[in-house]
Amino acid sequence: MNLLTEAARSIPEARYTRTVLMVHDKSPLRRELSRELRFSGYRVFEASTIEDTMRVSEREAAKQDIHLLIVDAAQVKETEDLALKVRALYPGLPVLVLSAEAQPGTL
């Protein structure tokens, strides 16, 4: 376990003021991004599929707001559809689209 992991685990739950839903199909990258966000004080829910994302979105809609959706843009059409579905539950939700593999002009 590295120091960053230890620090992230030591952050008390009450410190979180904003919640992020992180969607990425590659577990190592999703975990690392989530860890960095937690270290910065965000509460993070992780999902790897559209189905997981919708399950978390629907579950959390009744009890607390999700403040930001971060989604991988591996497949642009699916990313847009997913963002629209989640924003139906959270109108005005900001969506941050990330990609390490996108070609220029595809987003």
Image (cartoon, rainbow, N blue to C red):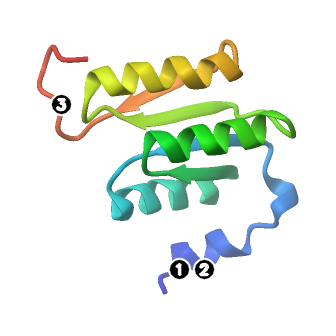
**Amino acid residing under circle 1:** Leu
Q: Which amino acid does the dot numbered 3 rest on?
A: Ala
Name which quarter of the figure residue 100 lies in.
top left
The residues bearing labels 2 and 1 have C-alpha atoms spaced at a distance of 5 Å
Residue 12, placed above or below residue 10: above
Front position in the image: 18 or 58: 58
Position in image of residue 17 (x %, y %) = 80, 43
Residue at the (63%, 51%) spot, across then down: 44
Proximity of marks 3 and 1: CB atoms separated by less than 8 Å: no
Q: Earlier in the sequence, mark 3 or mark 2?
A: 2
- Residue 72 screen position, x and y as percent: 35, 37
Q: Tell me, yes or no, if residue 20 can be seen here.
A: no
Label 1: which secondary element: helix
Residue beneath disc 2: 6
Q: Kindly indicate the quadrant of the structure image that contains residue 18.
A: top right
Residue bearing mark 1: 3
